Image: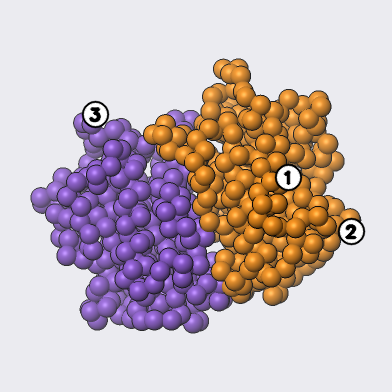
Chain colours: A purple, B orange
Amino acid sequence: MLKGHQSWIFEKKPKIISTATVVGPFEGQGPLANDFDIIHGDLYLGQDSWEKAERVLLEESTQLAIEKARLTKEQIQFYFGGDLMNQIISSSFAARTLSIPYIGMFGACSTSMESLALASFIVNHGGAKYALAGTGSHNASVEKQFRYPTEYGSQKPPTAQFTVTGSGAAVVSLEGDGPSVTSATIGRVIDMGITDPFNMGAAMAPAAVDTIEAHFRDLQIKPSHYDLIVTGDLSKVGYEIAEDLLKRHNIPMEETTYKDCGMMIYDYNKQKVQSGASGCGCSAVVTYGHLLNRIRKGDLKRILVVATGALLSPISFQQGESIPCIAHAVSIER
Amino acid sequence: MLKGHQSWIFEKKPKIISTATVVGPFEGQGPLANDFDIIHGDLYLGQDSWEKAERVLLEESTQLAIEKARLTKEQIQFYFGGDLMNQIISSSFAARTLSIPYIGMFGACSTSMESLALASFIVNHGGAKYALAGTGSHNASVEKQFRYPTEYGSQKPPTAQFTVTGSGAAVVSLEGDGPSVTSATIGRVIDMGITDPFNMGAAMAPAAVDTIEAHFRDLQIKPSHYDLIVTGDLSKVGYEIAEDLLKRHNIPMEETTYKDCGMMIYDYNKQKVQSGASGCGCSAVVTYGHLLNRIRKGDLKRILVVATGALLSPISFQQGESIPCIAHAVSIER
């Protein structure tokens, strides 16, 4: 049901009946390692290209999520997926392997919550008995496509972020047990004129705040409704800007913990990730791994995940355009 | 409501209350010229790059569709859009201009019906009062990205297709008048091993037939339910393969007219388009322009539009991969 201008309330509270997360070696050395289902030791995942390795991440997370739900892929009606590769080819190949009717999406790093929001809407309204939502990214394929191949060894400024190698998937249904998806807010494209692809956090922060503000306005609730609000991948630089903007917009965050997935997955003291983490895989594995585990354990009751996406294109960047950004928010409750 | 395994029935029959189509000069010389709202004489649309011209096509079709519905953009809750450009940047920039909450999609040339299916589902179930669906393509930006810049003047084989310069958009609502969207079938990824990007029709035909078959199985109806069934952009080569496959799969098409949008927009005698037309804009402008005009005039009563998409990526192609394809079907009735 539409609530306010851009939000949905899911009256039937669709449940996330299973999740699966698959990450690379570097993520396996970080503080959330115990929350991931599969940690690969080889960044190539036994493939002969980074793009093929990314596809395997997505295939593994989606298949494992289906398996953990004790379902077969034939029982899943729709797969909502996307990723950062041109033509979201990793997701399309995963959809080919799964052979599940497929709704391809592109929201850059906001795809985790874009796909979860739509899967939840469809399930809530009887459009599917079981829907699968998933996304992922691979550090080397993304760096190669958007910046420079990592083999070049180019130096990065402190505002740069490190793309997560990882994929997360979730099965949503009205039947079964698990945390509930209770609402979603779909974001607008916000572009404050930032053109630096090494400072995505600053570009995305205003989009995150715009969606957070819309969420509270539409649902007529306050931040204190949640134990935890997380943004997807603003990392240090973007997080500080978002904190500042939240204050300026009079969004009272005092009683709520506000964190960013991009600051949670790596250990800043030991891992050189500049501002922090980014990528479709970032909010996906932190949410579907770490945060849902905390909800399942009873450590968290209500959270709002605001996945942030820089809809950056190397071509439009080369043509002098700034970076359009977006954020989609989904609330998850025990 | 889910019907069968991969289809939705829209009980409330959401209406397409307005459509708008914008095309380039070459499409304006074809047999459907009278069905388009805006025909540009300049392929650059006054911009300094093909990509920027493509963006303008999308901005114009979406804004005109809203205007023709006698609405303002503030009254539209969600924009479902996508295109063929990497990171669907044309749609994202159009979404920035519109400032409407945005759900980015990627289904290659199937995006027209992918976005209409989702917009209709959301509207049918009260998730939006007004939703906008739109897509488009530009011949020169697409050729440059997927094959060779047209300026190279490279020769093409007779199986090649000509990408439509055009954009189509539709406003969907339960309130107002217009043709109704009654059902949708979401396709699976089908890949028969074809690797030739100059023969997309052959690659996509099996996906079209798979979705058509699923549609009739799920809805328990026969092709004769429709006056017209159109595929999106198989063009001559793919159309013949689809016709043959439909026979082999015992789908009785005798009492139904079966056509392809890719064979309708250009005049084969005067326009050199090899096998025919393709691109996100192809099924979008033929459906939202020509076919809906015929429904409005009473010339057609019930149609099934099966938009076909080759989820081709230059990178995966270079890495030896075949072309994964998909098709999404939407039924529209007077």
Q: Residue furthest right?
A: B298
Closer to the camera: disc 2 or disc 3?
A: 2
Closer to the camera: disc 1 or disc 3?
A: 1
Q: Please give the chain letter of the residue carrying mark 2.
A: B
Q: Amino acid at mark 3?
A: Tyr
Q: Left or right: where does residue B253 sit relative to residue B211?
A: right
- Classify 10 Å Cα crowding around label 1: few (below 14), some (14-19), many (20 and above): many
Tag 3 secondary structure: helix
| Residue tagged 3 | A152
Q: Quadrant of residue A228?
A: bottom left
- Classify 10 Å Cα crowding around label 3: few (below 14), some (14-19), many (20 and above): few
Closer to the camera: disc 2 or disc 1?
A: 1
Please say whether residue B239 is visible from this viewpoint: yes
Q: Left or right: where does residue A113 sit relative to residue B76?
A: left
Which of marks 1 and 2 precedes in the sequence?
1
| Residue tagged 2 | B298
Q: Amino acid at mark 1?
A: Asp
Residue B260, numbered label = 1
Q: Please give the chain letter of the residue carrying mark 3.
A: A
Residue B113: x, y in percent?
64, 54
Tag 1 secondary structure: strand
Q: Measuring 27% from the left and 78% from the top, which residue is drawn there?
A: A296
